[in-house]
Image (cartoon, grey):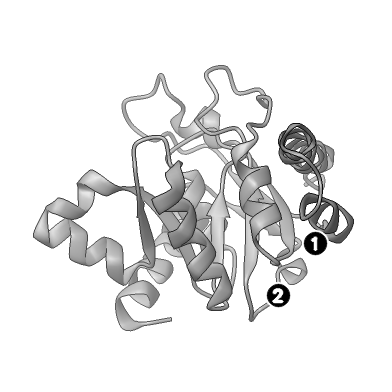
Amino acid sequence: MNFSYRIGWTCFRAMYATYFRWRVFGAENVPLQGGVILASNHASFLDPPLVGSGLKRDINYLARESLFRYPGIGALLRSWNSVPVDRDGGGAKGLKKILDRLLAGSGIILFPEGTRTKDGNLQPARSGIGLTVIKSAAPVVPVRVFGTFEAYGRNHKFPRPHRVTVKYGRPMSFEALRAEAKTCDKTRLKEIYQQVADEIMTAIAKLEPKPD
């Protein structure tokens, strides 16, 4: 971790531990080195730093490209390993940046649902994460956050002191589908992207927090 990232990481951990009384499970499932995709459900703006703060390694985050136009904000985002992407987080340019980070041995947080849930429930996965997984060689760790919708969902103007939990599952490998994707036709390739996305979302759904 660079100096700026460590300061942010420390402050977020303190906030989650005190204001949100956080719990973290399964952090040992995330490799401490090498490229890894953290695939999490998305319920709140609290989710990205929550997922990253539960780990003792630095993680890369996606941030809207327009935010980097502001000198101060842009410099801070870069120091926090943020990847500039377009509004939808897709496109060839954004994908290349993500793959470059993974190839360099970095971890990155992606949200299969694509956007925050409106009702607190899990949403269907979009095929975009399947494309990223197939194009990369990184393992995928399913992650599920709990309580962030109640703490700071779409309808809340300010965060509430509600308990939040993050749980990391066991790494998933998609070697067989990656191999098939190299030779199949375009129709099957699209099916593979969605299949990978659906399998990841199923793994996320199976994660449950441990009782108090």
Residue 197 lies, in percent from the top left, at: 72, 39
Amino acid at pointer 2: Pro
Q: Residue furthest left?
A: 71
Residue 185 left/right relative to 10 = right
The residue at the far right in this view is 176
- Residue 78 position by quadrant: bottom left
Circle 2 sits in a helix, a strand or a loop, which is it?
loop
Measured as percent of width and height from the top left, residue 77 is found at 28, 61
Residue visible at 84% across and 39% down in the picture? 206
Q: Disc 1 designates what residue? A: 171
* Pointer 2 with pointer 1, Cβ within 8 A: yes
Residue 62 at x, y percent in the picture:
42, 52
Residue 68 lies left or right of residue 149; in this view the side is: left
Residue at position x 82%, y 40% in the image = 199
Q: Nearer the viewer, residue 122 or 183?
A: 183
Q: Which residue lies under the disc numbered 2?
A: 31
Q: Residues within 10 Å of mark 1 (few under 14, many from 20)?
A: some
The mark that comes first in sequence, 2 or 1, is 2
The amino acid at mark 1 is Pro
| In-image side of 5 versus 128 (left or right) | left
Q: Residue at x 38, y 67 (%)?
A: 81
Does the image show residue 187? yes
Give the x, y percent position of residue 55: 59, 69
21 w.r.t. 42: above or below: below
* Corner quadrant of residue 45: top left
Figure quadrant of residue 73: bottom left
Q: Secondary structure at mark 1?
A: loop
